[in-house]
Amino acid sequence: PATPQQAARAHFFAAECYRYLGDTQKAIEYHQMVPKNWPTYEYAWLSYAKIYEILKLQIRRGLMSEEEGRASIRTCLERMCQGYPNCPMASSPYTSVIFPLF
């Protein structure tokens, strides 16, 4: 059986494979599993950052309305900043600039 660390890593990379294959819904689904099921995984916060990237791309490509995308991005950033306040993205000046936009 896989250790929690291995399971978290496997789900993270499965999400990235789905993203590269263009299945963004599956990618989001798998990235959401990482912090939900393995919140102490060292890179769990990175799944939120990847979801944020996917959502931005979906808005840019017109696959998601701007209103729906902004709401989803806000939720994603809130979860990341609340769950992982010391992660590089939550403590980044970039995040403090973009967060009010959503």
Image (cartoon, rainbow, N blue to C red):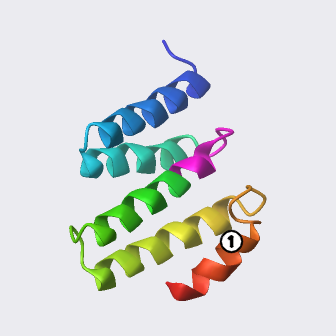
Residue 19 lies, in percent from the top left, at: 34, 43
What is the span of residues highlighted in magenta in the rendered image? 39-47
Q: Amino acid at mark 1?
A: Tyr
Asked which quadrant contains residue 87, the reply is: bottom right
Measuring 59% from the left and 48% from the top, which residue is drawn there? 46
Q: Secondary structure at mark 1?
A: helix
Q: Is residue 43 above or below residue 73?
A: above
Residue 45 lies, in percent from the top left, at: 61, 51
Front residue of this view, candidates 25 and 98: 98
Measuring 57% from the left and 27% from the top, which residue is drawn there? 4
Residue 100 lies, in percent from the top left, at: 59, 87
Asked whether residue 40 is drawn in magenta, I would say yes
Q: Residue furthest front?
A: 61
Asked which quadrant contains residue 99, the reply is: bottom right
Q: Is residue 22 above or below residue 52?
A: above
Measuring 38% from the left and 31% from the top, which residue is drawn there? 14
Q: Is residue 101 above or below residue 22?
A: below
Assess disc 1: are there few (<14), some (14-19) or many (≥20) residues with their C-alpha within 10 Å of its C-alpha: few
Task: Write down the residue under mark 1.
Answer: 94
Asked which quadrant contains residue 49, the reply is: bottom right
